[in-house]
Image (cartoon, rainbow, N blue to C red):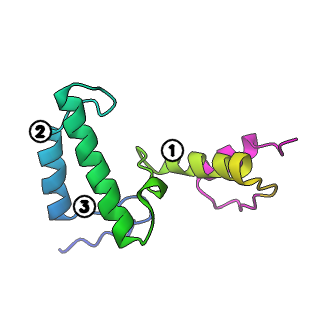
Amino acid sequence: MKHVYLDNAATTRVRDEVISKMQEALANNYGNPSSTHSFGRTAKTAIESARKTIAKYMNAHPSEIIFTSGGTEADNMILRSAVKDLGVETIITSKIEHHAVLHTRKKWKPMG
């Protein structure tokens, strides 16, 4: 029996070339990118190179590319940022929205 995966909203199979690049980075670029030692500088260079590549394909500026640890962090960051930095006063959600959005929205209070 062939299995078909239909839950791509939760997670998606990672392409083989991405896995290869990730393995390379985990094996060779494991330094803290915030550190000034050579391991950190190498990791920082790899991250900034990836940021520039992604920005190029998205017709964006590298400073617009933000890496997060996952969807929940990204949802929280964008909603809080929209209110704090962009002055958004209304966030509309529905009961079927992901908890990462609903819980962040529930804690949100209009600024000022």
Residue that lies at the very extreme toward the right in this rendered image:
112
Q: Quadrant of the C terminus?
A: top right
Q: Nearer the viewer, residue 107 or 59?
A: 59
Amino acid type at image mark 2: Asn
User: Which residue lies under the disc numbered 2?
Assistant: 28
Residue at image point 17% right, 29% down: 38
Residue at image point 11% right, 39% down: 27
Q: Nearer the viewer, residue 3 or 27?
A: 27
Separation of marks 2 and 1 at Cα, in angstroms: 26 Å
User: Which residue lies under the disc numbered 1?
Assistant: 73
Residue 14 is labelled as: 3
In the rendered image, the vertical position of residue 49 relative to residue 61, given as above or below:
above
Q: Is residue 54 left or right of residue 25?
A: right
Separation of marks 2 and 3 at Cα, in angstroms: 20 Å
Eye-nearest disc, 2 or 1: 2
Residue 7 is labelled as: none
Q: Which residues are magenta?
A: 91-112
Residue 14 drawn at (x, y percent): 25, 61
Q: Earlier in the sequence, mark 2 or mark 1?
A: 2
